[in-house]
Amino acid sequence: MKNILVKFLSGLIASFMLFFSISFMTVIPQLHSFLFRPDRIQFKIGFPLVYYQEMLVDCPDFNYHWSLANLLLDFGIGMLLVMSGYAIFQKYVK
C-alpha cells in the first residue's frame, strides 16, 4: 500500500511540473510579441485548452477570463500522460 501511495505522489508531483512547464512555455512567446508590439496586448495561458485569457480593452483597463473547467481538464490531461508514461516505462523496464 505504501509503495502505491509513493508512486501516486511522485506521479502527482511530475504532473504538476509538466503542467507548470507547459503553462510557462505558452506565456513566453506572448511576452516576446508584447515587447515588440505593445499595442496588441493579449495573453492566453494553457495548452491544449486556454484556461486564462487577458486582453487590453482600453489603455489602463484589462479584461480577463478564467475557465476553471479548462484548468482542471489541462491538469487532468497532463496527469493522464504522466501516469500512462510511467506505467509503460515500468512495464518495459522490469
Image (tube, rainbow, N blue to C red):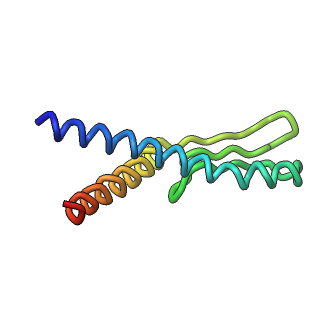
Viewer-nearest residue: 67 or 32 = 32
Query: Where does the image place residue 5, in percent across and percent down from the top left?
Result: 20, 36
Judge left or right: residue 22 versus residue 59: left
**Which residue is most to the front?**
94
Q: Residue at x 64, y 46 (%)?
A: 53
Q: Residue at x 23, y 37 (%)?
A: 6
**Which residue is most to the bottom?**
92
Q: Residue at x 88, y 54 (%)?
A: 37
Q: Residue at x 47, y 49 (%)?
A: 18
Query: Where does the image place residue 87, in percent across and percent down from the top left?
Result: 24, 57
Judge left or right: residue 10 versus residue 45: left
User: Quick check: 70 above or below 84?
Assistant: above
Viewer-nearest residue: 67 or 17 = 17
User: Quick check: 8 above or below 91?
Assistant: above
Residue 66, located in which quarter of the rendered image? Answer: top right
Viewer-nearest residue: 92 or 60 = 92
Query: Where does the image place residue 25, in percent across and percent down from the top left?
Result: 62, 52
Query: Where does the image place residue 88, in percent across and percent down from the top left?
Result: 26, 63
Judge left or right: residue 4 versus residue 14: left
User: Quick check: 91 above or below 73?
Assistant: below
Q: Quadrant of the C terminus?
A: bottom left
